[in-house]
Amino acid sequence: MNAQAFEVQVHAVEARRLDPAAALEFVSAPEFGGLNMFVGRVRDHSGGRAVQGVSYQIFDPLALRVFERACAEAMAEFGPRLRAHVSHAKGRLGIGDLAVVVAVGTPHRDEAFRACRKVIEIVKHQSPIWKQEHFVDGDSEWSEGCSLCGSEPAFEPAGETAQPSAAAPSASTPHVHGPGCSHDHAQAHADGERHRA
Amino acid sequence: MKIELSLFGCFGDFEPGARLELEVPGEPCIGDVRAAVDAHGRAHWAGFKPNVLAVSAIGTEDSLLRDPAKVPAHGRLALLPPVNGG
């Protein structure tokens, strides 16, 4: 893993807001002609209900590992000349606040687009992050999402301690969706994922 | 063996501090922990959804662990329901 090429962060919103300009600065280099960035913001509706805010909860140490792996997989597929940034907010956010920033810099635009898409999909589907939506009517609900159980790499037989599993799914590992995935399944299938019926 | 579980997402609402301690006999595997959580949830958690537990992962700060894996000696685990970042 190239630590200088990757920057991964979790920001508690009460301490620090996400900074897209700093993300672009990190992935910039004189030899890079393509910079691509995805910025996720809190929207004002979900499932037909008006939303007033969202709370994100993150299992920081494991999430940062997944972010790093996402960047490494992007570098393996689209690099080696690539820089990537991932930052995600945790805590309570209001409408329009920034939830996630992914930025990628590469020599040309095509690999920048594709690498950025790859990283954000891993962040969304494989990182230990949970979203609780707060509705205008006063109700709050945890959003259903994607199970981490099925994204499992090679598995050693039982009998040894602490065999790593889904925290390190590889690019070739299929993603198994949970009972209430809300993301773009068509894209997921296009990316070679499989769906739990 | 004493298991210290950090509870995330919907599971965090069931216990003060989003933490749960369970005593699981012997040298348990992750599947034993999952069964113990299921039993505890059915007995103590109003609104507990066993189908959500069934698709939830269990891991440490370093990795996720499959059901046949033995629980690490430190006994500290995290219960991770389906995720929804971004």
Image: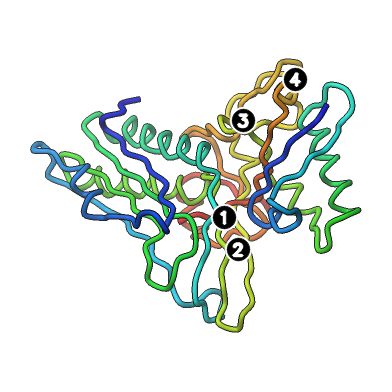
Residue at image location 38% in from the left, 43% down from the top:
A9
Q: Chain of mark 2?
A: A
Separation of residues labelled 2 and 3 (CA atoms)? 24 Å
Question: Which quadrant would residue B49 be assigned to in this image?
Answer: bottom right
Residue under label 3 = A165
Q: Are marks 2 and 3 on the same chain?
A: yes
Residue under label 2 = A143
Q: Position of residue A57 (x, y in %)?
A: 55, 54
Question: Which quadrant would residue B26 be assigned to in this image?
Answer: top right
Choose mark 3 or mark 1, whichever is in front: 1
Please state which of residues B57 and A117 is positioned toward the viewer in this rendering: B57
Are the residues tagged 2 and 3 within 8 Å (C-beta)? Answer: no
Separation of residues labelled 1 and 2 (CA atoms)? 7 Å
Separation of residues labelled 4 and 1 (CA atoms)? 30 Å
- Determine whether, in the image, residue A58 is placed left or right of residue B72: left
The amino acid type found where label 3 is placed reads: Ser
Rate crowding at label 1 as few (under 14), some (14 to 19) or many (20 or more) other CA atoms within 10 Å. Answer: many
- Give the SS element for disc 4: loop
Please state which of residues A98 and A33 is positioned toward the viewer in this rendering: A98
The amino acid type found where label 1 is placed reads: Trp
Please state which of residues A167 and B71 is positioned toward the viewer in this rendering: B71
Residue under label 1 = A130
- Give the SS element for disc 1: strand
Rate crowding at label 3 as few (under 14), some (14 to 19) or many (20 or more) other CA atoms within 10 Å. Answer: many
